[in-house]
Image: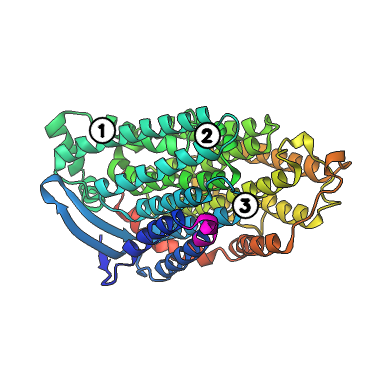
Amino acid sequence: MNEYTSGFHILTLLTVVPLVGAAAALFSGKHARAVALFTTIASLGLALFVWTSLPADGSMGMVERVSWAPSLGIEYHLGVDGLGALMLVLSAIVTLMSVDAAHRVHHQPNLYFGLVLVLESGLFGSFTALNFFHWFLFWELSLIPAFFLIKLWGGTRRGPAATQFFVYTMAGSAALLLAFLAVFVSTGSMDFGYLAQLASTGALEKMVTAHLGPVTIWLAIGVLAGFAVKVPMIPFHTWLPAAYAEAPSPVTMLLTGAMSKMGVYGLLRIAIPLFGHQIAQMRTPLLVLAVATVVMGAWAAAAQTDLKRVFAYSSVNHLGYCLLGIFALAIPASGTASFASQAAALNGVILQMFNHGITAAALFWFVAMLQERTGGHRGIDQFGGLRKPAPVLAGLMGIVLFSSLGLPGLNGFVGEFLIFRGVFPLAWVAATVSILGLLVTAVVILTVIQKVFTGPVPEHCAGFPDLHHGERLAMAPVIGLMLIVGLVPQLIVGSVNPTVVNLLAHWRF
């Protein structure tokens, strides 16, 4: 795979800027949020520059490569293609949204915003690193600040929720580490690109078998488990509802909007390129788990009465579509039509990652606004008739809810449509059953709209204030982005598709 090296170390700068901002925030006292806002805006500018500077052929761009410990296969190797660059933009947008939403953090704001910026750096590093050692450092770096953000600023059951989150994700990390140690022992390399080249010819499996025996399928299972926890995929999802519910809403925005995408990204950057043949062998049970994630996630959301838990399980459902698309395309292409279906599914997965990140983060932002105005209420049955005292909030939140539902014309529709367009010819049974998830999601979203915005206004919501000008100004670009992507998805798909074609050409199933 070709790589285009940049003389200017923009990816390193992108990773370092949030760390510098974190250090400044720690010593800024009550001005920590302003420092964080400035830092996240600068990071977004850099991420957009990276996005607009991608190689036209979908290859790795802006490559930085420095040898650290050659005998251990360790090197500082960065690069991005359409997939990585889009995740950088998503991470920058969601972090900016999270910082903007966290204007009521009064307990140790300098530490809070410092941790948020360290988390952003971990996200950037995870989406740019192309060597396992370097990548794993940032993968773990993002875990630590997330744990403390839940533990120190979360709800009444923040302790158990933070611990469960940490234990689950550490178990997944351990599985990843063990699998890659086995790969390194067999190949002497930790470089994703080189290992993907070995896998594309079948050499990786032969080398692992020669050194360790027929264990490649178990290594694939370990890597899948590590990423399944992060997505999360049923049955590895049980940490998510508690973590999302107990974390402060601005932190939940980061968990669902950006961190969950690390799991899907890992499947596309590491699992499929290295273990595509083994994943194809496990395709049927993996499709069953993906369909279960879609359908059971939607049904679990329908059973909740806490808005944060509703949207938490809804996130499981929406990310299940990404899993469905990934596992469905894990089959050798048998012709032009089959390749076109694989390309449609993969384009849909990448677009769904971006769209869900924006939409889910916006939903939890609105939950934060509801809590601020009602003294912490977030039960569906605790609201009603809010369209009367707060028509602007009801209208804008309604747009975000319809985006989550998948209404045509909004961003949520396009990714899901492409996924189903690609999956139906490749795995029609799985696609058909997954339609249940779409139907139940529609019921869930419409129920939320009915109970929160219509009917009589409860006494404690009689003086419910509408969005003030600052909130309207902050939410306007988010809503605008949903409309633009929904109406002109080619703005993203046009840049991502060369990467999709490039990836599919190098994957071996």
Tell me which label, 2 or 3, sits earlier in the chain: 2
Q: Residues within 10 Å of mark 3 (few under 14, many from 20)?
A: many
Q: Position of residue 254 (x, y in %)?
A: 52, 48
Tell me which label, 2 or 1, sits earlier in the chain: 1
Q: Position of residue 427 (x, y in %)?
A: 48, 40
Question: Would residue 437 be seen by someone viewing this image from the given angle?
Answer: yes
Q: Which mark is residue 362?
A: 3
Name the element at disc 2.
helix
Q: Position of residue 58 (x, y in %)?
A: 36, 64
* On screen, residue 351 above or below 252: below
Q: Residue at x 54, y 61 (%)?
A: 34
Does the magenta segment cover residue 30? yes
Q: Which residues are magenta?
A: 28-35
Q: Residues within 10 Å of mark 1 (few under 14, many from 20)?
A: some
Determine which residue is flagged by label 2: 240
Determine which residue is flagged by label 1: 178
* On screen, residue 354 above or below 210: below
Q: Quadrant location of the N terminus?
A: bottom left
Residue 82 image-quadrant placement? bottom left
Residues at discs 2 and 1 in contact (Cβ within 8 Å): no
